[in-house]
Protein backbone atom coordinates (compact mmCIF):
# COMPACT_ATOMS: atom_id res chain seq x y z
CA UNK A 1 0.00 0.00 0.00
CA UNK A 2 2.83 2.38 0.87
CA UNK A 3 4.50 1.75 -2.51
CA UNK A 4 1.22 2.42 -4.35
CA UNK A 5 0.66 5.63 -2.39
CA UNK A 6 4.21 6.78 -3.09
CA UNK A 7 3.81 6.04 -6.82
CA UNK A 8 0.55 7.95 -6.97
CA UNK A 9 2.13 10.86 -5.14
CA UNK A 10 5.04 11.02 -7.56
CA UNK A 11 2.66 11.03 -10.52
CA UNK A 12 0.65 13.85 -9.00
CA UNK A 13 3.80 15.82 -8.24
CA UNK A 14 4.92 15.44 -11.86
CA UNK A 15 1.58 16.75 -13.09
CA UNK A 16 1.68 19.64 -10.65
CA UNK A 17 5.15 20.70 -11.72
CA UNK A 18 4.71 20.19 -15.45
CA UNK A 19 2.38 23.20 -15.70
CA UNK A 20 5.28 25.49 -14.81
CA UNK A 21 7.55 24.31 -17.60
CA UNK A 22 5.99 26.10 -20.58
CA UNK A 23 6.66 29.83 -20.31
CA UNK A 24 5.87 30.73 -23.92
CA UNK A 25 2.41 31.69 -25.13
CA UNK A 26 0.97 28.74 -27.01
CA UNK A 27 0.20 29.57 -30.67
CA UNK A 28 -3.40 28.43 -30.07
CA UNK A 29 -3.70 31.37 -27.67
CA UNK A 30 -2.60 34.05 -30.14
CA UNK A 31 -5.32 36.69 -30.27
CA UNK A 32 -5.13 37.86 -33.88
CA UNK A 33 -3.93 41.32 -32.84
CA UNK A 34 -0.67 41.00 -34.77
CA UNK A 35 -0.57 40.72 -38.55
CA UNK A 36 1.94 37.89 -38.85
CA UNK A 37 2.72 35.31 -36.17
CA UNK A 38 4.70 33.02 -38.45
CA UNK A 39 7.80 35.21 -38.13
CA UNK A 40 7.95 34.96 -34.34
CA UNK A 41 10.82 33.02 -32.77
CA UNK A 42 11.48 31.87 -29.21
CA UNK A 43 13.78 34.30 -27.46
CA UNK A 44 14.67 35.75 -24.08
CA UNK A 45 13.88 39.25 -22.89
CA UNK A 46 16.56 41.40 -21.22
CA UNK A 47 15.21 40.22 -17.85
CA UNK A 48 15.58 36.59 -18.96
CA UNK A 49 11.89 35.86 -19.50
CA UNK A 50 10.64 33.66 -22.33
CA UNK A 51 9.15 35.63 -25.21
CA UNK A 52 8.10 35.09 -28.79
CA UNK A 53 9.72 37.88 -30.76
CA UNK A 54 10.69 39.17 -34.19
CA UNK A 55 12.83 42.18 -35.08
CA UNK A 56 13.33 43.29 -38.68
CA UNK A 57 17.02 42.60 -39.35
CA UNK A 58 17.13 45.64 -41.64
CA UNK A 59 15.77 48.13 -39.12
CA UNK A 60 18.12 50.86 -37.92
CA UNK A 61 16.81 51.89 -34.53
CA UNK A 62 19.24 54.81 -34.41
CA UNK A 63 16.93 56.39 -36.96
CA UNK A 64 14.31 56.90 -34.26
CA UNK A 65 14.60 60.05 -32.16
CA UNK A 66 11.21 59.88 -30.46
CA UNK A 67 8.53 57.35 -29.54
CA UNK A 68 4.75 57.43 -29.67
CA UNK A 69 2.95 55.06 -27.29
CA UNK A 70 -0.49 54.27 -28.65
CA UNK A 71 -3.17 53.73 -25.98
CA UNK A 72 -3.03 50.02 -25.15
CA UNK A 73 -5.98 47.95 -26.28
CA UNK A 74 -7.92 45.08 -24.78
CA UNK A 75 -7.99 42.55 -27.61
CA UNK A 76 -10.24 40.84 -28.36
CA UNK A 77 -12.84 43.04 -26.70
CA UNK A 78 -13.49 41.41 -23.31
CA UNK A 79 -16.72 40.79 -21.47
CA UNK A 80 -16.24 42.10 -17.90
CA UNK A 81 -17.32 39.82 -15.06
CA UNK A 82 -17.82 40.12 -11.32
CA UNK A 83 -14.34 38.67 -10.81
CA UNK A 84 -12.78 40.80 -13.55
CA UNK A 85 -14.72 44.08 -13.68
CA UNK A 86 -14.36 46.78 -16.33
CA UNK A 87 -12.65 49.07 -13.80
CA UNK A 88 -9.86 46.49 -13.41
CA UNK A 89 -9.42 46.07 -17.16
CA UNK A 90 -9.26 49.83 -17.67
CA UNK A 91 -6.81 50.16 -14.79
CA UNK A 92 -4.52 47.56 -16.37
CA UNK A 93 -4.38 49.34 -19.74
CA UNK A 94 -3.95 52.77 -18.16
CA UNK A 95 -1.06 51.56 -16.03
CA UNK A 96 0.51 49.75 -19.01
CA UNK A 97 0.44 53.01 -21.00
CA UNK A 98 2.05 54.97 -18.19
CA UNK A 99 4.77 52.47 -17.38
CA UNK A 100 5.67 52.19 -21.09
CA UNK A 101 5.99 55.96 -21.29
CA UNK A 102 8.10 56.05 -18.13
CA UNK A 103 10.44 53.34 -19.42
CA UNK A 104 10.83 54.77 -22.93
CA UNK A 105 11.28 58.35 -21.73
CA UNK A 106 14.76 57.32 -20.56
CA UNK A 107 15.64 56.39 -24.15
CA UNK A 108 13.64 58.67 -26.43
CA UNK A 109 11.58 61.85 -26.44
CA UNK A 110 7.87 61.11 -26.14
CA UNK A 111 5.99 62.13 -29.28
CA UNK A 112 2.33 63.18 -29.45
CA UNK A 113 1.72 61.46 -32.81
CA UNK A 114 3.41 59.23 -35.41
CA UNK A 115 5.76 60.81 -37.95
CA UNK A 116 9.24 60.62 -39.48
CA UNK A 117 11.83 59.47 -36.95
CA UNK A 118 9.11 58.26 -34.58
CA UNK A 119 8.90 54.69 -33.29
CA UNK A 120 5.27 53.74 -32.73
CA UNK A 121 4.53 51.24 -29.95
CA UNK A 122 1.14 49.52 -30.36
CA UNK A 123 0.46 47.35 -27.29
CA UNK A 124 -2.47 45.13 -26.36
CA UNK A 125 -3.53 43.09 -23.37
CA UNK A 126 -4.76 39.83 -24.86
CA UNK A 127 -5.54 37.68 -21.81
CA UNK A 128 -6.24 38.06 -18.10
CA UNK A 129 -6.91 34.93 -16.10
CA UNK A 130 -7.03 33.35 -12.65
CA UNK A 131 -6.67 29.64 -11.99
CA UNK A 132 -6.66 27.57 -8.84
CA UNK A 133 -3.12 26.78 -7.82
CA UNK A 134 -1.73 23.34 -8.56
CA UNK A 135 -0.45 21.12 -5.80
CA UNK A 136 2.90 22.10 -4.36
CA UNK A 137 5.53 19.35 -3.96
CA UNK A 138 5.26 19.33 -0.19
CA UNK A 139 1.50 18.75 -0.45
CA UNK A 140 1.85 15.49 -2.35
CA UNK A 141 1.08 13.20 0.56
CA UNK A 142 -2.25 11.42 1.08
CA UNK A 143 -3.53 13.48 4.04
CA UNK A 144 -2.53 16.80 2.43
CA UNK A 145 -4.18 15.72 -0.82
CA UNK A 146 -7.47 15.26 0.97
CA UNK A 147 -7.19 18.67 2.62
CA UNK A 148 -6.12 20.32 -0.63
CA UNK A 149 -9.04 18.73 -2.47
CA UNK A 150 -11.51 20.10 0.06
CA UNK A 151 -9.98 23.58 -0.13
CA UNK A 152 -10.06 23.63 -3.92
CA UNK A 153 -13.65 22.44 -3.99
CA UNK A 154 -14.81 25.12 -1.56
CA UNK A 155 -12.89 27.92 -3.27
CA UNK A 156 -10.48 28.42 -0.37
CA UNK A 157 -7.37 27.45 -2.30
CA UNK A 158 -5.08 30.21 -3.59
CA UNK A 159 -5.31 31.21 -7.23
CA UNK A 160 -2.61 32.18 -9.72
CA UNK A 161 -3.27 35.19 -11.93
CA UNK A 162 -1.71 35.68 -15.34
CA UNK A 163 -1.57 38.30 -18.04
CA UNK A 164 -0.62 38.14 -21.73
CA UNK A 165 0.42 40.89 -24.10
CA UNK A 166 1.07 41.29 -27.79
CA UNK A 167 2.76 44.39 -29.18
CA UNK A 168 3.71 45.68 -32.60
CA UNK A 169 6.37 48.31 -33.26
CA UNK A 170 5.94 50.45 -36.34
CA UNK A 171 7.90 53.04 -38.27
CA UNK A 172 6.03 56.29 -37.74
CA UNK A 173 6.63 57.51 -41.28
CA UNK A 174 4.99 54.64 -43.19
CA UNK A 175 3.41 52.33 -40.55
CA UNK A 176 5.79 49.52 -41.51
CA UNK A 177 6.03 46.87 -38.80
CA UNK A 178 9.63 46.62 -37.58
CA UNK A 179 9.17 44.33 -34.58
CA UNK A 180 6.64 42.16 -32.76
CA UNK A 181 6.52 40.51 -29.36
CA UNK A 182 4.20 38.10 -27.55
CA UNK A 183 4.63 37.16 -23.92
CA UNK A 184 2.84 36.29 -20.70
CA UNK A 185 3.54 36.81 -17.03
CA UNK A 186 2.26 36.11 -13.54
CA UNK A 187 0.34 38.60 -11.47
CA UNK A 188 -0.20 38.57 -7.72
CA UNK A 189 -1.75 35.52 -6.05
CA UNK A 190 -5.40 35.71 -5.02
CA UNK A 191 -6.48 34.33 -1.66
CA UNK A 192 -9.41 32.39 -3.14
CA UNK A 193 -11.69 32.05 -6.14
CA UNK A 194 -14.10 34.68 -4.82
CA UNK A 195 -11.51 37.46 -4.67
CA UNK A 196 -12.02 40.16 -7.31
CA UNK A 197 -8.99 40.88 -9.51
CA UNK A 198 -7.57 44.39 -9.21
CA UNK A 199 -5.29 46.37 -11.52
CA UNK A 200 -2.75 46.50 -8.68
CA UNK A 201 -2.40 42.72 -8.94
CA UNK A 202 -0.64 43.18 -12.29
CA UNK A 203 1.47 46.30 -11.82
CA UNK A 204 4.68 44.40 -11.11
CA UNK A 205 4.50 42.32 -14.30
CA UNK A 206 3.54 45.38 -16.37
CA UNK A 207 6.58 47.21 -15.01
CA UNK A 208 8.84 44.34 -16.10
CA UNK A 209 7.30 44.23 -19.56
CA UNK A 210 7.79 47.95 -20.11
CA UNK A 211 11.35 47.88 -18.83
CA UNK A 212 12.19 44.90 -21.05
CA UNK A 213 10.78 46.61 -24.15
CA UNK A 214 12.71 49.82 -23.51
CA UNK A 215 15.85 47.85 -22.63
CA UNK A 216 15.58 45.86 -25.88
CA UNK A 217 15.52 49.13 -27.80
CA UNK A 218 18.53 50.37 -25.84
CA UNK A 219 20.51 47.21 -26.58
CA UNK A 220 19.71 47.39 -30.30
CA UNK A 221 20.65 51.05 -30.44
CA UNK A 222 24.01 50.39 -28.84
CA UNK A 223 24.74 47.15 -30.66
Image: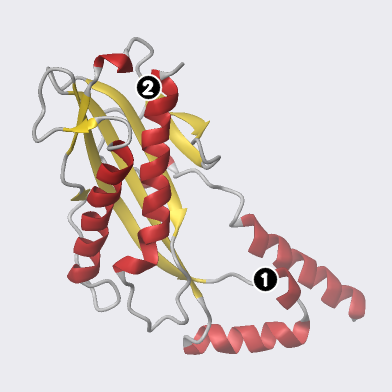
Q: Please tell me the numbered disc located at residue 136.
A: 1
Q: Which residue is mark 2?
A: 55
Residue projecting furthest to the top: 58
Q: Is residue 29 above or below residue 133?
A: above
Within-10-Å neighbours for mark 1: few <14, some 14–19, many 20+: few
Instruction: Tell whether 49 sits left or right of 83.
Output: right
Q: Please tell me the numbered disc located at residue 21.
A: none
* Residue at x-position 64% and y-position 72%: 135
Nearer the observer, 72 or 156: 72
Label 2: state its secondary structure: strand
Disc 2 to disc 1, C-alpha distance: 38 Å
Instruction: Tell whether 12 sits left or right of 45.
Output: right
Nearer the observer, 130 or 11: 130
Q: Is residue 167 above or below residue 135?
A: above
Within-10-Å neighbours for mark 2: few <14, some 14–19, many 20+: some
Asked if residue 181 shows in the view, the reply is yes
* Residue at x-position 26% and y-position 40%: 32
* Residue at x-position 19% and y-position 62%: 90
**Image x and y of residue 47, in percent:** 52, 41
**Image x and y of residue 6, in percent:** 85, 73
Q: Are marks 2 and 1 in contact (CB under 8 Å)?
A: no
- Which color mode does the image show? secondary structure
**Image x and y of residue 132, in percent:** 50, 73
* Residue at x-position 38% and y-position 67%: 201
Q: Earlier in the sequence, mark 2 or mark 1?
A: 2
**Image x and y of residue 21, in percent:** 61, 50
Nearer the observer, 64 or 158: 64
Amino acid sequence: MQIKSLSASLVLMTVALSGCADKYVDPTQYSGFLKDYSILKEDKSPSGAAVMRWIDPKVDVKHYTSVYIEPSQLYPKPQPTAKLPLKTLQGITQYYDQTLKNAFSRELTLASAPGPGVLVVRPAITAVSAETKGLRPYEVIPIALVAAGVSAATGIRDQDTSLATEAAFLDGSDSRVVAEVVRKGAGADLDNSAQVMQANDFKAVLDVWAQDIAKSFHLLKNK
